[in-house]
Image: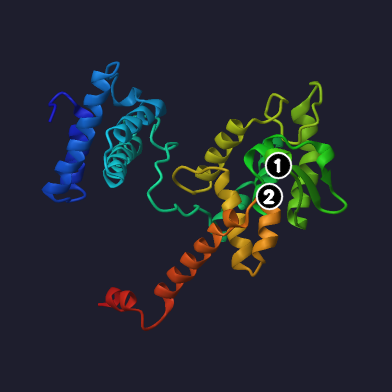
């Protein structure tokens, strides 16, 4: 191992002394990380682990794919990088984890990630206050949770699309396909409070573009702006790790199906062209049911083992 690479040395020490991994596993991590480092050294130079960016990770993964490396090996190498950067960010050795936004899909379908109801309640309960940004954030995440809208649909949402008397929104979706979504009384209250006072304060003397959600400068929130706000709000509320608005869409769909909604209804509300796209959520709910079964059924072997 490179004796000058203090960050890598700290990580290996952590695996040995805190995680107590086997020598074989530790060697695998070390090899994977050194291979990545060597690749960057040969292709434009290695600026240091703290300066590696998402694009560098993607170029490395592309190289692995071009080498016809087995998918399982690609996934393992990516897992090593994720574990390493998770360690560095938790220890505050680096500020940004470049692996967070990189998705390397496995051979099978990756089930959508979603939040449980108590987690959503935890976030919404944290957004209590009369300042404009708090009221905006409450309306924003209430809307995401109760409608399943895409982040692009929310950032582009105009005042004229909301029909408050019907608790409905006309959404301009992907492929210029329009659909209606419905929201509940709690979301209506949050939206009304935001639109009647907070939005006006955020707008100030700026020209009104008609966008529903504005930033602190009175301009329309962008997709990236919403992602940043969500990360900050959820982490502040105690929801750790990387989060993304699309997970709220998954949460909406999963909650609907778990509570007995018809698959066609969920398809319509999400704006999916094909029912097969919506069917992925049935796998999520089945996984959830299986997990609860294994956890609570009295004769489950795993539960019995835990008591020993």
Query: Quick one: 113 or 235, which is closer to the camera?
Result: 113
Q: Position of residue 298 (x, y in %)?
A: 39, 83
266 versus 158 height, above or below: below
Asked if residue 1 shows in the view, the reply is yes
What is the crowding at mark 2: few (fewer than 14 residues within 10 Å), some, or many (at least 20)?
many
Depth check, front residue: 213 or 101: 101
Q: Is residue 121 visible?
A: no
Q: Quadrant of residue 73?
A: top left
Residue in the picture at 25% in, 77% down: 308
The answer to whether mark 1 and mark 2 are in CB contact below 8 A is: yes
Q: Picture coordinates of residue 278 (x, y %)?
A: 59, 56
Where residue 129 appears, as percent x and y from the top left, is 68, 44
Which image quarter: residue 117?
bottom right
Local SS, label 2: loop
Quadrant in the rendering for residue 275: bottom right
x and y, in percent, of residue 33 in the image: 23, 34
- Tell me the tag on residue 173: 1
Q: Is residue 135 left or right of residue 100?
A: right
Query: Looking at the image, which residue is at 29% across and 77% down?
Result: 307
Q: How is the image coloured?
A: rainbow
Q: Residue furthest bottom?
A: 299
Q: Which residue is mark 2?
A: 271
* Gap in angstroms between the C-alphas marked 1 and 2: 7 Å
């Amino acid at each position: 191992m490179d004796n000058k690479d203090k960050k890598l040395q700290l990580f290996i020490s952590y695996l040995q002394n805190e995680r107590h991994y086997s020598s074989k596993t530790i060697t695998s991590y070390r090899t994977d990380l050194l291979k990545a480092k060597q690749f960057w050294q040969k292709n434009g130079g290695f600026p240091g682990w703290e300066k590696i960016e998402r694009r560098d990770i993607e170029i490395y993964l592309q190289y692995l794919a071009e080498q016809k490396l087995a998918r399982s090996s690609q996934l393992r190498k990516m897992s090593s990088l994720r574990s390493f950067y998770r360690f560095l960010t938790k220890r505050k050795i680096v500020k940004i984890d470049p692996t967070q936004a990189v998705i390397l899909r496995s051979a099978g379908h990756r089930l959508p990630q979603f939040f449980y109801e108590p987690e959503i309640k935890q976030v919404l309960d944290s957004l209590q206050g009369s300042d404009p940004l708090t009221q905006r954030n409450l309306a924003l995440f209430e809307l995401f949770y109760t409608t399943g809208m895409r982040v692009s649909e929310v950032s582009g949402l105009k005042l004229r699309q909301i029909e408050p008397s019907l608790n409905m929104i006309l959404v301009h979706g992907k492929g210029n396909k329009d659909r209606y979504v419905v929201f509940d009384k709690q979301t209506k209250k949050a939206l009304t409070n935001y639109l009647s006072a907070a939005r006006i304060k955020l707008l100030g003397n700026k020209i009104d573009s008609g966008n529903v959600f504005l930033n602190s400068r009175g301009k329309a929130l962008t997709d990236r702006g919403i992602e940043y706000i969500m990360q900050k709000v959820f982490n502040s509320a105690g929801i750790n790790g990387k989060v993304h608005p699309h997970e709220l869409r998954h949460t909406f769909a999963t909650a609907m199906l778990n509570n007995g909604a018809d698959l066609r209804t969920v398809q319509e509300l999400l704006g999916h062209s094909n029912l097969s796209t919506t069917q992925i959520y049935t796998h999520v709910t089945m996984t959830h049911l299986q997990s609860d079964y294994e956890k609570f059924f009295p004769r489950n072997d795993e539960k019995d083992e835990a008591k020993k």
